[in-house]
Image (tube, helix red, strand yellow):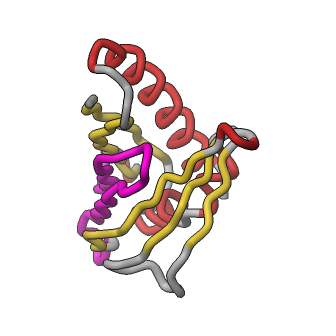
Amino acid sequence: MVTFLLERTAPLPLDEAWRRLTEWPRHGDVVPLTRVSVVTPPPTREGTVFVARSGLGPLSFDDRMEVTVWHPPADGEPGLCRLEKRGRVVLGWAEIEVRPGPGGRTRVVWREELRVRFLPGFADPVLEAAARSMFGRAANALLRRP
């Protein structure tokens, strides 16, 4: 199991940074070999379920997630979303927070606890480095793309 934290600032209003980070199918556009589909009807709220299918052919797996906290930013107040990962392979949670940052920018905090079933503990440093890199690049790309 690994736990990591990513922080970014973006020259975006809170609500736009939130939208870019929480439109779930967009994650499939920026994470290689991944497709994201929302299982429950819109809009996103507590109880929304979506699935990230990653891999190629028989080496694919589903990362099923449920939104358990949904507090969009409003009136300049921070926003917080918590996801519980409930797949057969990937478990844990993720939190995406947007809050006012310096100079009218938005500060993004992405926290994640990640467990991969059947992966031995000695592989955690490699998992952490890979996850930090992948989610960091994804956050950067999501914040850059309108």
Image location of residue 45, percent across then percent down? 37, 80
In the picture provided, is 133 more to the left or to the right than 95? right
Image label count: 0
Q: Quadrant of residue 6?
A: top left
**Residue 40 relative to residue 120: left or right:** right
Task: Give the side of residue 134 with respect to residue 128, left or right.
Answer: right
Q: Nearer the viewer, residue 21 or 126?
A: 126
Q: Is residue 92 magenta?
A: yes
Q: Position of residue 22 (x, y in %)?
A: 48, 63
Q: Position of residue 106 (x, y in %)?
A: 38, 51
Residue at 64 percent of width and 43 percent of height: 60
Q: Position of residue 97 (x, y in %)?
A: 30, 55
Identified at 32% across, 71% down, the residue is 73
Magenta part, dominant SS: strand
**For residue 136, above or below residue 35:** above
**Above or below — where is 122 with respect to 92?**
above
Q: Tell me if 52 is positioned left or right of 115 in this view.
A: right
Q: Residue at 42% across / 28% down in the picture?
A: 132
Q: Which segment is the magenta one? A: 73-101
- In the displayed image of the protein, which residue is found farthest to the right? 57
Look at 41% across and 76% down and name the residue there.
48
* Front-lying residue, 111 or 56: 56
Residue 140 in the magenta stretch? The answer is no
Image quadrant holding the N terminus, namely: top left
Q: Nearer the viewer, residue 84 or 7?
A: 84
Eyeballing the image, is 14 above or below 71?
above
The quadrant of the picture occupied by the C terminus is: bottom right
In the figure, residue 83 lies in which quadrant?
bottom left
